[in-house]
Image: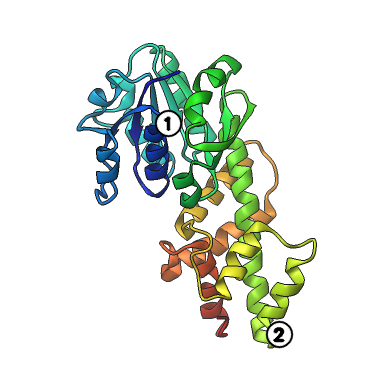
Amino acid sequence: MTQTVGFIGLGMMGHGIAKNLLTKGFGLRFVAHRNRTNLQDLIDAGAVEVNTREALVKGADVVIVCVTGTPQVEEIVYGTDGLLTASGRGLVVIDTSTAEPASSTRIRIDFAAKGVTFIDAPLARTPKEAEEGRLNTMVGAESADFDRVRPVLAAFCENIVHVGPPGHGHVLKLINNMLAMTTAAAIAEAVAAAAKSGLSLQKLFDVISVGGVNSGIFQMMLGRALQGDLSGLKFAIGNAQKDLRYFTHLTEMLPTTSYVAEAAHQSFVQAANLGFADKFIPSLFEVQAKLNNVKIL
């Protein structure tokens, strides 16, 4: 079992991951996130802060990257003091972000030339499950590499699925997020129509909740919103816009049609342009209220 993990990206998801690695007995070295408000408990638990990526990989068998998307991953790998330069033979880099498969392929090839293994293991669920050590991960890796990193992933994941060879983790994550975000966009539009017609949103919720259209996304969005809570799905609208852009780019490259995803992507572009990029997904109800001049909640 790997004893020391280097960690980059102590954000909303990363803090819980790091905490659980420490709790499960792994050593942890990290380069600080720009937000330092969530670091002290990790340091108190034994984590070691370093200032460079070269220092981060020293003595680490695995480095976990937990950032937003492809631009951030590429900066970490190729930028000043980048992991590609700092890393040595035998290191494993696990990318838990939601990233573009084409970029991940390039990074994997460049790392392989240095004897470094690059594994895509994007995550599902929310910061709440990250803190609880109950995330899901979909891993793209060769079988031997998957077996090697599984104990590390088990420290913070409840469900670990080896979905196929390198790259398939990121492809599956984009498909997963496309299904989630197109559902969210459809729910927001449906609720706006219900509100404009005068239909009781509580009755709408009651009927959908006991039928085949019900879903976790529906419960996290409207179920919590009816209680005055627009944080039931803690994922930013701007990140959803990014993930749908990655998905539609993937479909262009395959190529396959993606009418529904393209439409949903534009609904998130519009929401971001209206100033909602940093708000959580349930704020799509606020967007629809503004667009349709209707009180929803």
Give the image location of residue 267, x and y in percent.
56, 64
Question: Which one is nearer the viewer's eye here, 152 or 58?
Answer: 152
Q: Nearer the viewer, residue 288 or 230?
A: 230
> Residue at label 2?
199
Q: In the rendered view, does 294 fall on the left or right side of 28?
A: right
Q: Residues within 10 Å of mark 1 (few under 14, many from 20)?
A: some
Q: From this viewpoint, is residue 263 visible? A: no
Q: Does any portion of residue 59 appear in the rendered image? A: yes
- Residue drawn at the location 56% of the way across and 72% of the way down: 225
| Residue drawn where x is 43% and y is 62% of the image | 277
**In the picture, residue 19 is in which quadrant?**
top left
Question: Which quadrant of the figure contains the N terminus?
Answer: top left
Residue 218 x/y as whole percent: 65, 63
Q: CA distance from mark 1 to mark 2?
A: 50 Å
Say which residue appears at 42% left-offset and 46% top-offset.
Answer: 13
Give the residue type that dot 1 points to: Lys
138 and 154: which one is in front? 154
Q: Residue 133, percent across and down? A: 49, 41
